[in-house]
Image: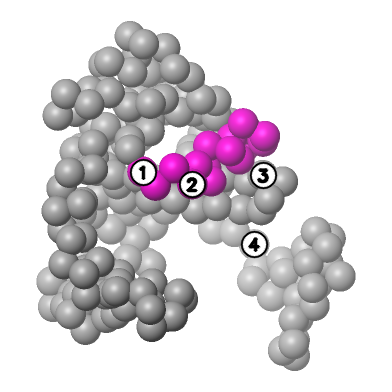
Amino acid sequence: MNEMGASKTKFKGRVGSIDDLESLYGPPVPAALTKEISHISDHYKEFVEAAPFVVVATVGIEGLDCSPRGDPSGFVRVYDKKTVLIPDRRGNNRLDSLKNIVRDPRISLLFLIPGVGETMRINGTAEIVTDQGLRESFKMNDKVPASVIVVTVEKMYFQCPKALIRSKLWDPKTQIPRSDLPTIGEMQRGILGNEFDAETYDKAYPERIENTIY
């Protein structure tokens, strides 16, 4: 068992200590350390406000969660140099991320901007608020979010573009037609069995998304 109690891997060459890990990779690149700050700088603010998409990672007693959030650029609002605000739009009501925040305030955010290789990261703590005026300020299509996630920044830094360059994430030539993959209905049928009507589910899906987007 390692320091966090995780199971040992079935593969050879398991790295079991921080010393082993640092020996394997060597010291960090100096710029990777100097870019980390404990507040939102003016330049970092521009990245956050340009991002239409953020991945929200949380942790709780039931485990980890990683959830995508998206809206027009600027939907994650920089309130001050230590605080960002994220409206919680209508979803499936699993509430995995929100339950985690209530139980454990630790949070991590990863911002992506279409066409831009660098990503922006925030690590900090979060709370869920229902202030009516604040919620109203995030209204979209006359719909008010049920709550707002208030994130206090502890660490913030940008990530170099290597991963996005290797993945060619923004290259139109690498896009995969949706029809090449199983539909939502087909995946549900694979879980629930052949009695699930995948065709009817898929046919109604676009309208359902349109009616529940906000």
User: Residue at image x 86%, y 70%?
Assistant: 1
Circle 1 residue: 91
User: Residue at image x 27%, y 81%?
Assistant: 181
How far apart are the alpha carbons under marks 2 and 4? 41 Å
Closer to the N terminus: mark 3 or mark 4?
4
When the figure is inspected, residue 143 is found, relative to residue 180, above or below; the finding is above
Tell me the mark number nearer the camera, choosing from 1 and 3.
1
- Residue flagged by tag 4: what amino acid is it? Pro
Q: Secondary structure at mark 3?
A: strand
Q: Residue 27, which numbered label?
A: 4
When the figure is inspected, residue 155 is found, relative to residue 163, above or below; the finding is above
Tell me the mark number nearer the camera, choosing from 3 and 2.
2
- Residue 76: horizontal and vertical position, in percent? 32, 32
- Residue 57: horizontal and vertical position, in percent? 52, 48
The reply to whether discs 2 and 1 touch (Cβ–Cβ < 8 Å) is: yes
Tell me the mark number nearer the camera, choosing from 3 and 4.
3
The magenta region covers: 91-107
How far apart are the alpha carbons under marks 1 and 3? 20 Å
Closer to the N terminus: mark 3 or mark 2?
3
Q: Residue 60, which numbered label?
A: 3
- Residue 15: horizontal and vertical position, in percent? 76, 76
User: Residue at image x 39%, y 57%?
Assistant: 160
Q: Image quadrant of residue 60?
A: top right
Q: Secondary structure at mark 1?
A: loop
Q: Secondary structure at mark 4?
A: loop
- Residue flagged by tag 3: what amino acid is it? Gly
Q: Image quadrant of residue 165?
A: bottom left
- Residue flagged by tag 1: what amino acid is it? Gly
